[in-house]
Image (cartoon, rainbow, N blue to C red):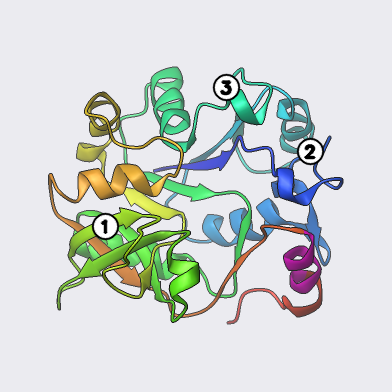
Amino acid sequence: MKCLILAAGYATRLYPLTENFPKPLLKVREKTILDWLLEDIDQSGVVDGYVVISNHKFAHHFKAWADGHALPITVLDDGTESNETRLGAVRDVQFAIEQLGLKEDLLVIAGDNLLDFSLQGFIRYAGEKKTTCIMRYYEPSIEKLHKTGVAVVDEDDRILNMEEKPAEPKSHWCTPPFYLYKAEDVPLVKKGIESGCGVDAPGSFIAWLSAQTVVHAYEMPGRRYDIGNLESYQNVQEEYRGIKK
């Protein structure tokens, strides 16, 4: 299994911190955001390579970080240089698939979120379900649901409906950007793009895919920290205590 890290955004809401530096490499306590994520994932023992998908502006920062890392990390430069010309997360996933000829299971994660629980439970869950899987958590705020992916699931966790940034949310199940694509669904990323699925939000592909085949949604056993602006970054610095054992 390979792990794809979506890191080609420009984090304009975090300026001036991210005007010339990528958000996933900002430090929270003593580690970068990416190191918190990758060190946990690596303990699962099932990921044999990590791929950071960056834009051209920040690729050299990721390459310098990867060069000093013990993990097998490949950095891909998607060639974009501004927020206005970005490919979008789904096209970045397809870019990595084509560049590296990926045909195996893929753990796809955003590089700018922190979790206080281990992703190893999610990886095991996907192995048990034997389908592409996503994560979900209960979000009481309708206002927040308007800005994220929202899923409707049945009693077996199967996604019945999923929509990105819905005007009228059909449930309170929020879907953060953590996915495990089964190998047989990897070729469908290209088909989804060609069929007109959204490309900016990574969940847009899953919304399309769940209408084509079975996709399950794992209920998160802990909290996700979304670092979207300077205030939330400050809050994470004060609140985050790492992964709960």
Image check: 37 left or right of 140? right
Mark 3 nearby-residue class (10 Å; few <14, some 14–19, many ≥20): some
In the picture, the disc for residue 68 is 2
Task: Name the foreground residue: 77 vs 176.
Answer: 176
Q: Kindly identify which residue carries mark 3.
A: 78
The residue range painted magenta reads 230-236
Measured as percent of width and height from the top left, residue 172 is found at 35, 75
Measure how far apart labels 2 and 1 are at the Cα level.
39 Å
The residue depicted at 76 percent of the width and 63 percent of the height is 233
Q: Is residue 76 visible?
A: no
Q: Is residue 63 visible?
A: yes
- Residue 194 spot, x, y in % from top left: 25, 23
Disc 2/disc 3 C-alpha distance (Å) = 22 Å
Residue located 62% across and 21% down the image: 80
Residue type for callout 2: Gly
Find the residue positioned furthest to the right.
16
Secondary structure character of the magenta stretch overall: helix
Helix, strand or loop at mark 1: strand
Tell me residue 43's x, y (percent): 54, 61
Instruction: Tell me the quarter of the image containing the C terminus.
Output: bottom right
Work out whether mark 2 precedes mark 3 in sequence or the reverse, and give the earlier one. Answer: 2
Q: CA distance from mark 1 to mark 3?
A: 28 Å
232 is within the stretch colored magenta: yes
Picture disc at residue 137:
none
Say whether marks 2 and 1 touch (CB < 8 Å). no
